[in-house]
Image (cartoon, rainbow, N blue to C red):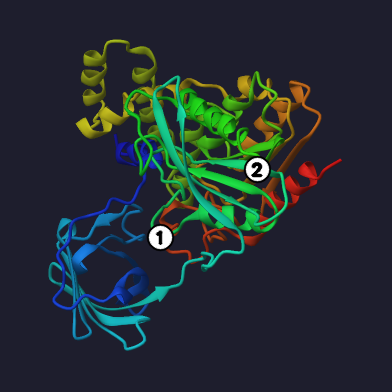
Amino acid sequence: MAGARVWVLALLWWALAVFPARVGAGPAPAPSLAGAWLGRSQLSPVASRRAVFIIQAGPGGSFSGVFVSPDQSPFAIALSRVSLGNGQVTIEVDAVGGRYEGTLNQEGTQMDGRWMQGPASLPLVVQRVEPQEPPKPYPYLEEEVTYSNTADAVTLAGTLTRPPAGGPFPAVILISGSGQSDRDETLFWHRPFLVLADYLTRHGIAVLRVDDRGVGGSTGDVSQATSADFARDVRAGIEYLQTRREIDPRRLGLIGHSDGGSIASLAAVDTNDIAFIVLMAGTGVPGDVVIEGQIVSRLKLAGVDPGVIDATLQAQRRVIDVVKSETDPNRAREKLRDLGCSDAQIQKLLLPWFYFFITHDPQETLRKVKCPVLAINGALDMQVLAAVNLPAIEQALREGGNPDVTVQELPRLNHLFQTAETGWLDEYAWIAETLAPPALETIGTWIEMRTKPK
């Protein structure tokens, strides 16, 4: 069981999210404290540890946010308290027994202080990182919209952006990956769907981005939902766009990221309403194979012995076998506990979404997709491996007789399509870039070529 903790991490990558925290107001809060702050604490002359604070301003001068130490864990930890008075900043992270005390410079761009955790007290300078986001006012129209998936009694809320004049325009719906996401697919301080929507709208393409079920302005219970259910939400979005006179109903497409790619494919089969699909790091193999790829790539990157990698995969497969084969939930829980899973992990493993994810074969759906498809992956994607998934996607589409298939691996990009060094999760918050220009240009150019009036 030496690799047990590793495969548990791999199983839960899809649940990675930023959790807001209630934190105390400082004596003299300042809006300039809100933002993403990145720095390094020097452990020795040759070793350092990265630190990320993501701070949001709340009502009444309060602050909320998270702390990430990518070199220790890829997961965000809620801040407990944040205060700012006379330029002095205090940030407390009770979950790890950590405390940061620093001084904010007059420009609001840097904090110079110390990180204290247990007996350690280390110098830590953090600098504000400007997000890769479009400044307002936008050169296009932005509208808050709601519509219904009547079959599932779900109300969906989102943002529709469209060029300011002309039309009717081609349009796309953006579909987020696994785990509950808001309409911007916010992760740490990045908002990739905001950046993508801005780029496409500036190039003449209307974009609808939507809060997932149970997030933001959208209703619905996700506890029993699978990707097939989310595909019905997407179809509801297509039906809504067909009612808008500014939108060309013959040029409606879908862009799905990660598991959103599978959802896009599910939504596109057996209909002529979808003119094209873009799969951003979409899967071409069942989820259990996807997870095994994550495990192997991560452990190889860490230099782990092949014997340990094999043992970790075997432990992983025992867990998956229980989830696949045990129909009695109580017996499944008992067996998973025997395999070392915690109650929190078991709860996620037994979700209907997870069962669908590990048993659904995307190739079966892709063979039925007849509209043009662009499939792109980052070469450094360690969550959905390009070398495994891109060939599987292309094979299935061509076996189904799809005449317009474009498959492209983008150098140096990770799962979020950021320019990366290793591609692993611990870099996501650390990279200043939200979406690399080559990814934006590839998607935009391909869509423009397939939506030009003939």
Q: Residue 319 carries which label?
A: none
Q: Name the residue under label 1.
A: 189
**Outermost residue, top direction?**
327
Q: Local crowd at mark 1 within 10 Å, few (<14), some, or many (≥20)?
A: many
Q: Can residue 66 be seen in this view?
A: yes
Q: Which residue is located at x 32 percent, y 76 percent? A: 32
Q: Local crowd at mark 2 within 10 Å, few (<14), some, or many (≥20)?
A: many
Q: Is mark 1 on a helix, strand or loop?
A: loop
Q: Quadrant of the N terminus?
A: top left
Q: In this view, does 354 lie above or below 298?
A: above
Question: Image check: 341 left or right of 70?
Answer: left
Residue 41 image point, x, y percent: 31, 74
Q: In this view, does 90 lie above or below 141?
A: below
Q: In this view, does 229 lie above or below 178?
A: above
Residue 92 image point, x, y percent: 17, 66
How many callouts does the rendering have? 2
Q: What residue type is labelled 1?
A: Trp
Quadrant of the rendered image containing residue 117: bottom left
Q: Which residue is located at x 51 percent, y 64 percent? A: 133
Asked if marks 2 and 1 touch (Cβ < 8 Å), the reply is no
Q: Which mark is residue 171?
A: 2
Residue 319 image point, x, y percent: 34, 25
Task: Tell which circle, 2 or 1, labels the residue nearer the N-terminal end.
Answer: 2
Q: What element carries label 2?
A: strand
Residue 25 image point, x, y percent: 16, 68
